[in-house]
Amino acid sequence: MFYRLLFFLFSVSAFSASIQAVFAYEDFCEIPNETSLFFIEREPIIRIGLATNARSVSITTTDSSLVAVSPDEPQKFLAANRVSISARSYRPPEIEIYHFEIPNVESQTEADSLAKEVAGATGEKTSASMDLKTNTWRVVVGKTFETIEEANEFKADLSDKGFEAEMITEKITQPSDEAVKLSNQVAKNPKSEVRSIIPTRPNANSNNVKPTGLSNPTNTDINPNLREVIVSGASPSAKFSSLKAVAFGSINERAVPVRVNGKAYRGRIEVFVNSRGTLTVVNAVSLEDYLLGVVPNELSLPQLEAQKAQAVAARTYAIANIGQFGKQGFDLLPTIRSQVYKGYSSESTMATQAVLQTRGIVATYKGKPITAYYTSTCGGRTENSENVFDSNEPYLRGVECSLEGHKHFEPFLIKTIRIPAKMRDEKNLELVRLMSLFAVNGFQLSTAQMSDDFFEDPPTQSELSNWLNQLATKFGKTFPNVNKDSPKPLEIAHILAVMIYGENYADTLLAEADINYQLSFDDAGEIPQTRRADVAILLRDGYFTIYPDLTLKPNKPFSRAKMLHLIRQIYTKKKWMPTLQSGTAQAAEDGKLIVKNGKSSRQIIVRPDVFLFREFGDAFYQVKEIALVGGETVNFQTDANGSVIYLEVEPTGTTATAEKNSPFTIWNTTLSPSSVQSRLSRYVRGIGSLIDVRIAKQGFSRRAVDLEIVGTNGTFHLKGGKIRSALRLNEQLFALNKRYDSNGRATSYSFTGRGWGHGVGMCQYGAYGLAKMGVKYDTILKHYYTGIDLTRAY
């Protein structure tokens, strides 16, 4: 079984190991030298401080009964599945003791004589003393007895010897052995906040506490502030008190979690008194079970390799920080101060798989587990640890939140076999896009690579025939006859006039004045009479064009560029231009276009000969490949099979880094000078009135690592992670933009930043993004943690 160390009911020794107040990892591993492998003899128990100031706590199970166990005691079946725990002042037990005396002796002489006589007859010690109440003497006979049976027997023996003594009964409180032990524990560990008996460390001498019966008295002082754990349940066995820590679990612990105030946890729930007199509640759980409740809460994004990376980071962090809160009796907190842990009810299928598949694996550097910091969103780059925290760790170096160079975009690429156009003249750039769009709608494209020369040349007879046939189909006319002179403007005009209006339409309906009015450009006189009406009516209705120099050049064939402009002019006027589908792209997968459609998305195959265009600035350029990282606006056309044959992409304005799915990739906070001063004053004292704030130094990632604060009392500096804490910003990766008044004083501070968190170590959203790209968990970890090894520690 995968859970090697959990027993149906764990033994006292296992329990003792589980409730150690302080662990150091040197206790359970050996690191002979810097190059050795890190290992642990067995999976450790992690102690999570669920509550540190509880007045009471309810512990339940859906099993038939709870089980309780304390140090050096056998486990106890409570015959109840619900108990309430509280704390109260320790009440030492009260006992009766007995001694004998002969009272009312008249004088000291008589008392001394009687004492000698009794001692001689009985062999018991005797003593004479004066009773101040009666002003007489008395003789005390023998020792103090702890039971009434012993006292009666002694009284009878005295009577047989002729002495009638009076039995004196006295009630006293006698601290228990546990009270003595706990008092010693508190005295020896004054800095510890634990105020219940916990097990001694393995191999410690446990024989140094002696019984406290009167036959073996102790001179140990009892701590007057002792409090005990009070357990209250429905059955008699579920009602008891203890000066020891008490751990509770289900009978079938593996299958049935135990609940604390209704919230389920694996392992055991331990309760003990703390130095405030309240209760500390600890979940003592195996490390792997602990991770089941950490991973889905620290990284819930649905990529297995990312969650596996998180599992290793969380496991490493836990091991490296065992004993972090040892003075309080546990290792870690269930919050962001340590790692977010929400127990059994928060577990997920993918996170469990991630933990199982990485069981025992930790990140190490030179044989020691690293401090595996991780951050939600790094803003595109992580930072060197010394610029945020106090430690300078060689494995916590700033890195880009992306793979190196072009490799980062390879998983998102859509490619085409088409050769991009080679253009020099900017005015022809739009023709590449126009020709491509016409080409996917039936227009012949006679070159493998478009160029300026291609567009400046006239169309071939075959091309022109195809293009005009496309127009004829739109107008519902027969295909025209095309010859070598057809590209000339007058021939084109006649073909279009017949196609649009029919034979002799213009010549019949236009008067000479109408014709002359339209043909008022420079070389209109070169147009033969037989073609003048055709050109005039086409110009009148917006179906024809002339050159920029106010000429038609009747004998010069139209270039491809001129013909394409003319066809677009006609298509636009008739509203025949192809309509493209539009949408927002998600990250491409396996060369497929994924378009977001409301809350869902659809995946579309892209043809290998697709026409690809990408916007640069305000113009679209034909490209060989394009990366769709998600968020781009896409316009596309599909063929009869539903595959994309034409695609143009407007790049996203958001980040292209691996963390691009985070909601914190960009943010802005604007503060008034008074707000900035109020926030900073908690960390920097004596500023006076704030004059200005500026970034004095940036780190590797461009994070502010030194903030200069100018006040009326001087210049101050705030450094490292305190900058983010003081200003209460999402991150300290920000640009600072200030507005000033006419006197040069700042009137507002605008912080535009990226990311969320401290920015050191593994970027969680970055890990998710890399995993989506197909990057495995070990590569993800080694990307964010420089120079580490991954070691199976147990």
Image (cartoon, rainbow, N blue to C red):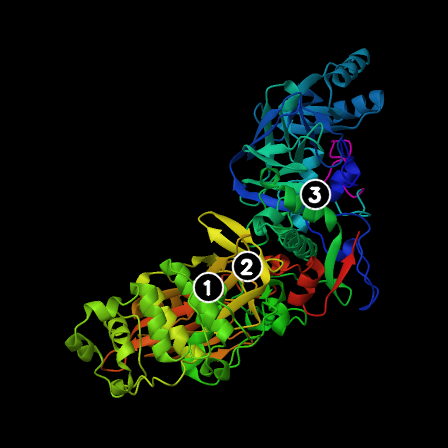
Q: Is residue 350 magenta?
A: no
Q: Distance of mark 1 from mark 2, alpha carbons?
A: 34 Å
Q: Up-down: is 422 above or below 326?
A: below
Q: Nearer the viewer, residue 591 or 379?
A: 591
Q: Which badge, 3 or 2, is on the more N-terminal residue?
A: 3
Q: Position of residue 222 (x, y in %)?
A: 64, 40
Residue beneath label 3, please? 19
> In which image quadrant can residue 667 be found?
bottom left
**Residue, x 80% and y 69% (percent of image)?**
34
Instruction: Verify CB contact (< 8 Å) between mark 3 and mark 2.
Output: no
Instruction: Verify CB contact (< 8 Å) between mark 3 and mark 1.
Output: no
Q: Is residue 212 magenta?
A: yes
Secondary structure found at label 2: loop
Q: Position of residue 78 (x, y in %)?
A: 67, 23
Residue beneath label 2, please? 587
Q: Nearer the viewer, residue 713 or 632?
A: 632
Say what amino acid the circle numbered 2 marks: Ala
Residue 243 seen in this snapshot: yes
Q: Residues within 10 Å of mark 3 (few under 14, many from 20)?
A: many
Residue 45 seen in this snapshot: no
